[in-house]
Image: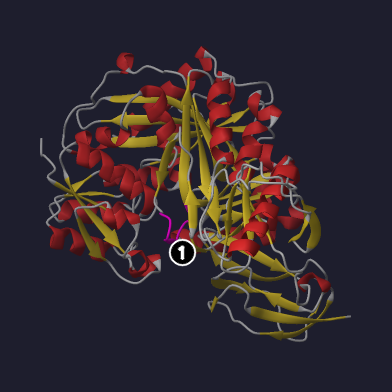
Amino acid sequence: MRPIRRLLVANRGEIAIRVFRTARRMGLETVAVFSEADAAAPHVMAADVAVGVGPAPVRESYLRPERILAAAKASGADAIHPGYGFLSENADFAEAVVAAGLIWVGPPPAAIRAMGLKDAAKALMQAAGVPVTPGYLGESQDAADLAREAGRIGFPVLIKAVAGGGGKGMRLVEEAAAFDAALASCRREAASSFGDDRVILETYVARPRHIEVQVFADSHGDAVHLFERDCSLQRRHQKVIEEAPAPGMDPATRAAVTEAAVRAAKAVAYEGAGTIEFIADASEGLRPDRIWFMEMNTRLQVEHPVTEAVTGLDLVEWQLRIAMGEPLPLAQAEIQLSGHAVEARLYAENPAAGFLPSTGPLNHLRLPKGVRVDSGVAEGGDVSPFYDPMIAKLIGHAETREAAIAAMAEACEGVEVWPVRTNAAFLANCLKAPDFIAGDIDTGFIARRLDALAAPRAPSAVALSAAAEAAVALAQDGDGPWGGGLAGFRVNGAADPAVRLFLDGKAMLGSPNGMSERSVLADADGHIVVFEGGEAIAFTQAAPGGLDESSGDGAIRSPMPGKVTAVAVEAGDVVEKGQLLMVLEAMKMEHSLTAPISGVVEAVLVSEGGQTTEGAVLARIVPT
């Protein structure tokens, strides 16, 4: 065995802080790495030592293996934990860590390579007796060949990047006419995210459930599972809410899927933490013969806390002990399930605006009590356009699924963030949906209910009253205490006349009654913000001015900072309303901009590969 003394985490944000927490408990010294944008980030403050690794863009800092290794040398680290994302599934980096004489807290490079490419991994799993999803795993990447194979499989069909993961490089194609455009988009995103634009095809399961099994293996030939998680609530193939154990999982199906997962780990001589992902056909409930292998994530998962909650185990501690050469801490029979856990991913995004990323300062940040909160940001910091927009993971655990869901819904409704927008109210809506509570879920759950789940709620009478009271206080006292949140603020004395307020351009009346209990703040831009149900409702006292951009002035403005990855039109082109104009990449996701009106493209003001800022005019269209 080889002990670890000083551990470097080659990642940022909440996962770096999470690993540091366990390392500190085990008596290890910790090293953070940071980009120029993260110099004062919470994960830097949480470590014993911190080393800069370059400019803000990940390809110039966190994704530069030589800079991570140089940081390890400079700090005296003797081990590297990759967290998840960035370099965690990079076999070349793992080899470089070992070659540098450091301990790699992860699986062997050979195992990463074996499971890193979806086509090769599925072939390997077939040989090991693990059932795989029907589809096309052939070598040809010719667009015509792929279109022909898609027709053979039958639509709808999934296009998936060979090196994909995290929902990126994946497209659902409903009909043959849409295949070529979806293939091009998938390849573009795959090349940008993974440096590999090859794809495979899979048959599309009509009512899919995403079931994954947490596995661990040591260097002594033993492997175990830590039961399953259900990650079926997704939006655009990105996980939103995860839980453990999977609702509706019977003993026979659990035995089938967990045993298959352990076989898969042993087939590649795995070591450390890994997740075997399966897709289940839930049209007739979970059944042992209707679950197929999809892929293996050769790292710790974002949703690992739900497994920790139901097993009472520290998965990072297991990783570190296995990396030091110790045997698995427990045998399979000693690992028990207890209760139910649910995790929700709190993101800086605006559901009411199509879930566009929301970047900027975190002037006000209140995260809930009573549940586990894993976060990598702090009040006074900001949400950067360079990285994943996660604010926190909220994890609730209770004796029953119903109690865990209720605790999580309450937690999400208690989130307060401003001026950055979040998906907290959307998460609460998902958790309170009757079909979700009943366990009637699949990966299309959110898409079928998106309008209702993402719709901004109208302010209640209590919220209006709270805003009116704030307006009265501002008029009487100036700025006074309104620079920050005031939970449970009350105005004493008789009720005042109704106060005129504006919300999204609409006038409404609020009646101060001195009895409102809502957290309220006023900001420097004249907003009176009331927090209700996880939503930040921003009132103003002045009528909105300026041109309504939806009136069709023809200017195509960037909804966020980002990189222009594709431009589909040029000056002089005739376009129809809804036609694709260009594609932006931000927060590791692609966002398509379409024509808001029919007309002629007067000018295109950006080019492919260029950077843009929020609100910048990208093109102009003259209506016809």
Q: Is residue 404 above or below residue 352?
A: above
Q: Amino acid at mark 1?
A: Ser
Relative placement, left or right, of 186 versus 54 is right
Q: Secondary structure at mark 1?
A: loop
Foreground of the two, 520 or 242? 520
Question: In the picture, which quadrant includes the N terminus?
Answer: top left
Does residue 70 show up magenta in the picture? no
Foreground of the two, 259 or 26? 26
Foreground of the two, 418 or 259? 418
Binning the other alpha carbons within 10 Å of mark 1 as few (below 14), some (14 to 19) or many (20 upward) gives: some
Q: Is residue 202 visible?
A: no
Relative placement, left or right, of 291 versus 328 is right
Please state the extent of the stretch shown in magenta in the rendering: 378-390
In this figure, which residue is indicated by the disc labeled 1? 384
Residue found 67% across the figure and 45% down from its top: 514
Residue 403 in the image: state x and y as whole percent. 55, 22
Residue 283: image quadrant is: top right
Residue found 82% across the figure and 69% down from its top: 577
Residue 459 in the image: state x and y as whole percent. 73, 47
Residue 169 in the image: state x and y as whole percent. 55, 54
